[in-house]
Image (cartoon, rainbow, N blue to C red):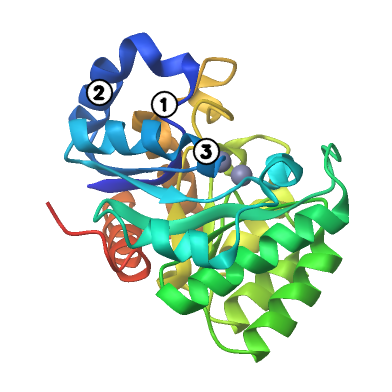
Amino acid sequence: MLIDTHCHLDFADFADERDAIITRAHEAGVTQMVTISTRVRKLDGLLAITEKYPSVFCSVGTHPNNAGDELDVQTEDLVRLANRHEKIVAIGEAGLDYFYDTQTPADQKTGFVRHIAAARETQLPLVIHSRSADEDMIEILTTESGKGAFPFILHCFSSGPELARTGVELGGYISFSGILTFPKSEDLRDIAKTVPMDRLLVETDAPYLAPKRWRGKRNEPSYVINTAEVLAECKGVAYQEIARITTENAFRIFSRMPRL
Ligand SMILES: [Zn+2]
Ligand SMILES: [Zn+2]
């Protein structure tokens, strides 16, 4: 049993095949999935998917690459929306993306801090997207945690060891995607070895980043097993053990998500 803690089932890539994709996930042992919001304005589409499929849950938030388009969304809006529907189990994804610098750092930070405040208030986990922004991310996480703790996940972790260390010290979880399986990701696997067992999660970030076994194909939730296999190797434990632990961790951090 595994949980894909981060995918994007509302993307057009999946439109015609969602039934088949979710069936394949279940057949592979992926019992539950969290489909992650990238625009608050598209929340209704996400909710419709979660209402159709009992095993699919969702979040609410604005991806940093869309930050400038949703600067009207305030903390209280996020809190109100998050409490509107029982299938919303997280805030985000929000954060900083300086790799695709389509949005100004100032707009990204404004949105990010509002999402942090919403996570602090609701105590729902904040799904954090951080790319090429380690220094600013460490500073914001440290400063904001000092104002009051909030649960969070550093999703699709592909940053440096210092951000991983800071995340763990502040009580956060580290989620690994298919990037962990790539031949060139030796540094990332070294970081995975240092993350405590009780903070590890796995995800696909589908439709992006198919793991090595399916590299070049469109990603989907069933493929999360390959990431879990590589994570098990990193930690020197059996696959079944990593599956059990990451699933336990997922239910702990996604505290509103029921076991089906
Ligand atoms: Zn992301
Ligand atoms: Zn994502």
* Residue contact at pointers 1 and 2, CB within 8 angstroms: yes
Residue at the front extreme, as displayed: 72
Please state which amino acid type lies under the numbered disc 1. Glu
Q: Quadrant of ligand 1?
A: top right
Q: Position of residue 45 (x, y in %)?
A: 38, 31
Residue that label 2 marks? 24
Q: Position of residue 246 (x, y in %)?
A: 35, 59
* Mark found first going from the N terminus, 1 or 2: 2
Task: Note whether ligand 2 is within 8 Å of mark 2.
Answer: no
Task: Please name which of the two marks, 2 or 3, marks the residue nearer to the observer.
Answer: 3
Residue that label 1 marks? 220
> SS at mark 3?
helix
Return the residue nearer the eye: 224 or 190. Answer: 224
Place residue 255 in its image quadrant.
Answer: bottom left
Return the residue nearer the eye: 88 or 225. Answer: 88
Q: Indicate left or right for 133 with 65 as reference.
A: right
Report the Cα–Cα distance between label 2 and label 3. Answer: 29 Å
Residue that label 3 marks? 41
Question: Which circle marks residue 17 in the picture?
Answer: none
- Badge 1 crowding class, 10 Å Cα cut-off, few under 14, some 14 to 19, many 20 or more, is many
Task: Note whether ligand 2 is within 8 Å of mark 1.
Answer: no
Q: Is residue 2 above or below residue 24?
A: below
Please state which amino acid type lies under the numbered disc 2. Arg
- Badge 2 crowding class, 10 Å Cα cut-off, few under 14, some 14 to 19, many 20 or more, is some
Report the Cα–Cα distance between label 3 and label 1. Answer: 24 Å
Task: Please name which of the two marks, 3 or 1, marks the residue nearer to the observer.
Answer: 3
Residue in view at x 29 percent, y 47 percent: 2
* Mark found first going from the N terminus, 2 or 3: 2
Task: Note whether ligand 2 is within 8 Å of mark 3.
Answer: no
Q: Position of residue 6 (x, y in %)?
A: 45, 44
Residue in view at x 73 percent, y 38 percent: 184
Please state which amino acid type lies under the numbered disc 3. Arg
